[in-house]
Image: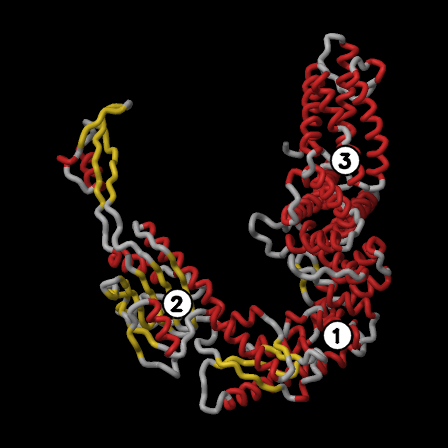
Amino acid sequence: MPDLLIELFSEEIPARMQTRAAEDLKKLVTDGLVEAGLTYAGAAAFSTPRRLTLALEGLTAESPTLKEERRGPKVGAPDKAIEGFLRGAGVARADLVEREEKKGAFYFATVVTPGRKADAIVAEVLEKTIRTFPWPKSMRWGAGSLRWVRPLHSIICLLTDEGGAQVVDLDIDGIKAGRATRGHRFMAPAPFDVTSFADYEAKLKRAFVILNAGERADAIWHDATNAAFAQGLEVVEDQGLLREVAGLVEWPVVLMGSIDDQFLGLPPEVLQTSMKEHQKFFSVKNPRTGRIEKFVTVANRETADNGATILAGNQKVLAARLSDAKFFWENDLRVAQTGLEAWTDRLSNVTFHNKLGSQKDRIDRIAALAREIAPLVGADADLAEQAARVAKADLSSEMVYEFPELQGLMGRYYAEAAGLPTEVAAACQEHYSPLGPSDDVPTAPVPVAVALADKIDTLTGFWAIDEKPTGSKDPYALRRAALGVIRLVLVNGLRTELLSVFKFGIDAQPMKMALKGAWRNCEMEAKRIEEQLADPSFVGSLISGTREELEQLLPTIEQALEDSRREYDAHVEHLNEGPKDLLAFFHDRLKVYLRDQGIRHDVIDACLAMDGSDDLARLVKRAEALQGFMSSEDGPNLLQGFKRANNILAQAEAADGVEYSFGADPKFAETEEEKALFTALDAAEARIKPAMEAEDYDTAMAAMAQLRAPIDAFFEAVQVNSDNQVVRRNRLNLLSRIRQTCLQVADLTKVEG
């Protein structure tokens, strides 16, 4: 069983595309080979800036011969139909056999597909892969039709077994497959032949190419951290940058440089962002001061002067970049020290959404919403409103214009420079959080209030204009915003009735305000017209006609007003439904969040069906208690008893046309088990009601668990549908008490058995 080695050697592949390209190469080739009848034992894909490589072990030497029986036309069918079947099956008329089936006699043919050698299949699959490769962007070069991310120079396609290495016969637009590759562009540019993957990898390393991207990343991190440690410093960890840099070099050489003293006063985040975005440098900080003092760059070659010339050039370019950052920082500080209002006012010229107004309009809504939310989260309302009014001011700053990823963080620096309260400065930075499931959640009251207001304004705004997520499309990241609100509420244990907050948010949106204004204007216009029409002199000045013409005009005006009223009412009804619809969207997000926490979907549904489901903290507390109860021995057994009682009761109510919900009396109890159930229900209700009022769900569940044994005993000893109608009604009302008692805790009808 041979091994297969493929290398596609080209000009530099962008680092961001390499990992995905290696995975695509592996999938396309292996899927194609398997579809053609070949199997393999293992596959591994690799990428460097100039090559994609695929290695397969244990490939079968040829595909198996396949036999397939195909049914053709009916016996006696027209000759043209039979000839078409013969051509498709690749057989002669004499090869057909007749066979009787239920629907008559049919022709059958046995089609034999002979096996093919692996090299022919590999050549076919690889050519198709190269010609249809899913690059995000590709190019053509020269006179050929082939497209690749960058000009493709050579192809290795080798099948290696005990007898040696065989080059697969393949020619794509004049590029013939061979066994030769090249090493490092500068340190080992000469071509060399390879015979197997092991030989290929070893020779590449001797030619200053590390094939494995993970190995390159490990080497970079090891050398960088060692160099920093030797000077008592630390490299700021950045896995994304590490992966990117590993895709920029084939032979990483780590160099450490210094930052000019004039730039050390810049905020560390500014230094780090500038060096990362513009130069792909790692930041090196002093662990004692937290200040960024040096940088690490990764060269792609070794030099006679140990990188001194490379470092000198990098430091010169870095100084120019940091000079720009220093200029932005100092300019912004001068503005900030006079107050942030000038920046906020500029945002009136920045459109947030054409139906939702400018960023300044949005800030006004967030400020009002933050004041509304502040008491719910224990924040000072004045501070919350103040923080909301300046939280987005840094969007107008020069630094954030240059580095948008620093929004919020720079807002904190500028708020501090303006002398604003600490809580306000913190809110400027933290109100965007949490941005994702692993992001930290603000816990201080003022940042929490502003963060909630920011996200809820986004959600209520897009709900008001009916721009909701559909399927996998969520262009405004509304699912992320909802999850952010959920995490803010749950992490901080906030007791918030979201429906009222959503209503406040929707009422403040431009759509709702515009509707109110439009209807007021409409009513005022109608009143003005009625007054004018009541004035004979005015009517006479406009209309020279008969009284009949005037009478025809009045219904037209009244109909127009009625149409406007209906349209207004429809819009208002839609907006009034917005809070409920948005809450349902939150419930869907909460289900996903809680399922990730290990809570069953049916348990969540049982709690969502209860009143007060817009209080997420209470909802989750109830769900956790019910989950624990259903995980105990009593839970499933009590659920079975509850469902049995509910089913019997539902059938009886349907048959009798009445509701059995009142009047169960112990004096009609005939058995000890029946009497014991009355006593148990009295005891459980006495514990459950105060526990539910106190939101002590664990105690309520424990009280409900005490019903398990009496309910089991009741159903074992008692026949509910007694011949005595008084006793039957009493027992059905007793079942109703079981239902009512259990449904106080959660809607157990939604819990699966």
Name the spot of residue 11 as percent of width and height, x first.
39, 74
Name the residue nearer the viewer: 745 or 535. Answer: 745
Residue depicted at 25% across the width and 33% down the height: 71
- Left or right of 614? Residue 320 is left
Residue lying farthest top?
Answer: 723
Per the image, the residue denoted by label 1 is 413
Q: How many marks?
A: 3
User: In the displayed structure, would residue 359 be above or below residue 717?
Assistant: below
Mark-to-mark CA distance, 1 and 3: 49 Å
Name the residue nearer the viewer: 341 or 411. Answer: 411
Name the spot of residue 56 as percent of width and height, x first.
35, 60
Name the spot of residue 543 as percent of width and height, x first.
74, 44
* Mark 2 crowd level (few <14, some 14–19, many ≥20, 10 Å Cα): many
Name the residue nearer the viewer: 588 or 243. Answer: 243
Residue depicted at 25% across the width and 43% down the height: 66
Mark-to-mark CA distance, 2 and 1: 45 Å
First in sequence: mark 3 vs mark 2 = 2
Residue 92 occupies quadrant: top left
Per the image, the residue denoted by label 3 is 745
Q: Amino acid at mark 1?
A: Tyr
Residue 335 occupies quadrant: bottom right
Q: Which of the two discs, 1 and 3, sits closer to the camera? A: 3
Q: Which of the two discs, 2 and 1, sits closer to the camera? A: 2
The answer to whether marks 3 and 2 mark residues whose Cβ atoms lie closer than 8 Å is: no
Which quarter of the rendering shows the N terminus?
Answer: bottom left
Per the image, the residue denoted by label 2 is 52
